[in-house]
Amino acid sequence: MKIGRIGYINCAPVYGAIDRGIVALPPGGELVTGTPSELNDLLVAGELDLSVISAIEYARHAKELVLLPDLAISCDGPVRSVALFSKRAVERLGGSTVLLSASSRTSIALLELLCRDVWKIRPKFAEARAEATDLETLAALPHEAVLVIGDAALQLAAAGTYPHRYDLGEEWKRWTGLPFVFAVWAAQRVAKADLRKTTHETLLASRAWGLAHLDDLAAEAARKTGVTLAACRDYLGGLDYAFSAQHRAALSDFLRRAGVPQFLQVA
């Protein structure tokens, strides 16, 4: 079974025990690492059997996928790793060029909603690569603001190169009062049910270890990203990896606002 995982540190609490050999994958299990957009496309194409997937992409392809219970990446307030970095106040971005991370799907949809319904602006959007290795090139592109996600967003915030930063999790919370679900885990409907169940249980066991060892994971994250240990610990501790009834309701609210048909059937 091919299992997708995002290469950002936000997935460390779910996969850290697997990486260390503390929790074993089912026989024949293989981890495939990529950006959120890459994993979305691979899962939908049938190249992965089970993966973390952007919440909005799951909804768009729900008839071919099975949503796994009790496992997601969400926040209830600031998320820290999904942010709009801007050279000017957001209210002044109407007509300005805003770059969008090519690695994102859910975050782009959330930003479009905030622009339309909260900030009442109509920027000109353009896609660009915005991984950690792209930040120097990104700075040279003509733009007034840029949406950056993952480790790159943490690094860009630490650099302080933009005078304005808007945390999309915080903006959503301020707007709706709800948590925000950025990603869920799903499997191909054609995947064997018993293997799907075993893999899901493996991920839950690994998450349990990860949440009990956030200090260790934060130290490793700080070494990997160059972001301070305190910032990495606050970041990982501020994320929620559950998928409760409240999370499903919040996701439904987001999908409704985004005009995406809903089929949130949990396995």
Image: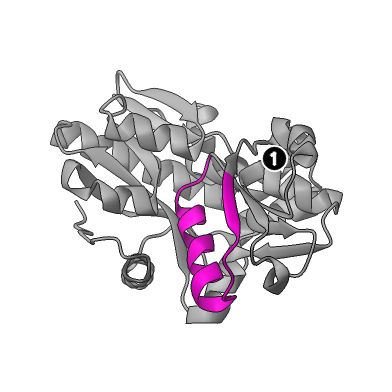
From the viewer's side, name the closer residue of 65 and 13: 65
Q: Position of residue 120 (x, y in %)?
A: 56, 76
Q: Is residue 147 in the magenta section? A: no
The colouring scheme, among rainbow, by chain, secondary structure or one colour, is: one colour
Residue closest to the eye, 257 or 198: 257
Give the position of the N terminus as an image quadrant: top left
Residue 158 x, y percent position in the rendering: 82, 51
Tell me where residue 186 appears, x and y as whole percent. Answer: 29, 44
Q: Secondary structure at mark 1?
A: helix
**Does 107 appear in magenta?**
yes
Q: Is residue 76 visible in this depiction of the protein? A: no
Q: Is residue 136 left or right of residue 95?
A: right
Q: Is residue 152 above or below residue 261?
A: above
Give the quarter of the image for residue 165.
Answer: bottom right
Identify residue for label 1: 221
Q: Residue at x 46, y 58 (%)?
A: 109
Mark 1 closeness class: few <14, some 14–19, many ≥20 residues within 10 Å: many
- The magenta span reads 103-126
- Residue drawn 26% across the image and 39% down it: 187
Residue lying at 76% horizontally and 45% vertically, measured from the top left: 155
Is residue 136 among the parts visible in the rendering? Answer: yes
Question: Residue 142 placed where, x, y %?
Answer: 75, 44
The one nearer the camera, 221 or 201, is: 221
Give the residue type that dot 1 points to.
Ala
Determine which quarter of the picture holds residue 94.
bottom right
Residue 214 falls left or right of residue 141: left
